[in-house]
Amino acid sequence: MTNKKIKTARLSIFSNLFLIILKLATGILTASVSILSEAIHSSIDLIASAIAYFAVKASSKAPDKRHPYGHGKFENISGVIEGLLIFVAAFWIIYEAIHKMFNPSEIKHFQLAILVMFISAVVNFFVSKRLYKVAKETDSIALEADALHLKTDIYSSIGVGLGMVFIWITGWHFFDPIFAIVVALFIMKESYNLVKTAFSPLLDSQVSEEEYGELSQIISEFSIKNKLEYSHLRSRRSGSVHFIDFTLIVNPEISVKESHSICDSLEEIIKSEYLDTDISIHVEPKVLNSNTI
């Protein structure tokens, strides 16, 4: 799984390098600020991809004496940095677009500009699809963040491409910086969502309500089936690792060995649903009243 994550992160780096060269050359040839803004966007994506690559490698290291809970939060830190980089890129795009409004220039080579934007959208579609697939398989926040970068690039490339078509038909060149600003505002929104998702585990926040509900249902079904009870369920994430702890209330008359066997069975079920887990179960005897005995 780790090798798959690293190879996928590397794929993102190479695709972004290719698109930066393509967009930068096209932006200079066409004198389009929206295409140059796309080159800036891809440059930030390249930095983000490199961060994701090193974060995935670092987070895959086994727990050690200094980091007994592993290195998973490298992925969360990576996600936060990537989100902030997206925001910086969006701000820079707006700055350049406003400057272009007061210093307009005529766009050239429309056919080339449109072709390059749609090539960019297609490349990022397939790479982001691959990133999302591996992110879900490995539960990697770093790859998910990188996929989100490329997803925003798909929409922005299509937007700029359609903008080029519109300007080509109407001849209204002042729309070029306007399209760039619209793209930047969209990127800012995605940046906020990414930082919010990646930052939460750094504070050891409880997992999402949906994930907590799924986990609670797994334990409840097992408890009902085996005539057990549970309480004090807590769960947090560190990168792709789920830390889960709760109290399992068992019949006081069973042996320690039986209690341990029950816990092992429950852990196997939980681990079949969550790839990378660190589970801690505290066993307590059920208080039996006189009517139960």
Image (tube, rainbow, N blue to C red):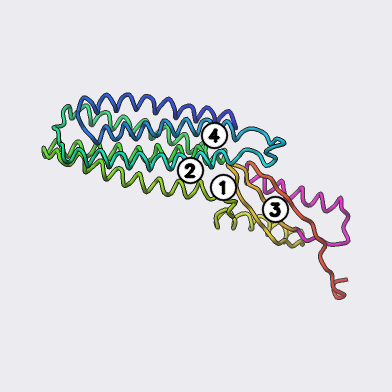
Q: Residue at x 72, y 48 (%)?
A: 267
**Sequence-first tag of 1 and 4:** 4
Read off the residue under disc 2. Answer: 80
Does 222 sit above or below residue 273?
below
Q: Residue at x 58, y 28 (%)?
A: 3
Q: Secondary structure at mark 3?
A: strand
Read off the residue under disc 3. Answer: 245
Q: Which mark is residue 202?
A: 1
Is mark 2 in CB contact (under 8 Å) with mark 4?
Answer: no
CA gap, disc 2 to disc 4?
A: 12 Å
Q: Which mark is residue 55?
A: 4
**Sequence-first tag of 2 and 4:** 4
Q: Amino acid at mark 3?
A: Asp
CA gap, disc 1 to disc 2?
A: 10 Å
Q: Amino acid at mark 2?
A: Val
CA gap, disc 1 to disc 4?
A: 14 Å
Is mark 4 in CB contact (under 8 Å) with mark 3?
Answer: no
> Magenta stretch containing residue 285, yes or no?
no
Q: Residues within 10 Å of mark 1 (few under 14, many from 20)?
A: some
CA gap, disc 1 to disc 3?
A: 18 Å
> Magenta stretch containing residue 261, yes or no?
yes
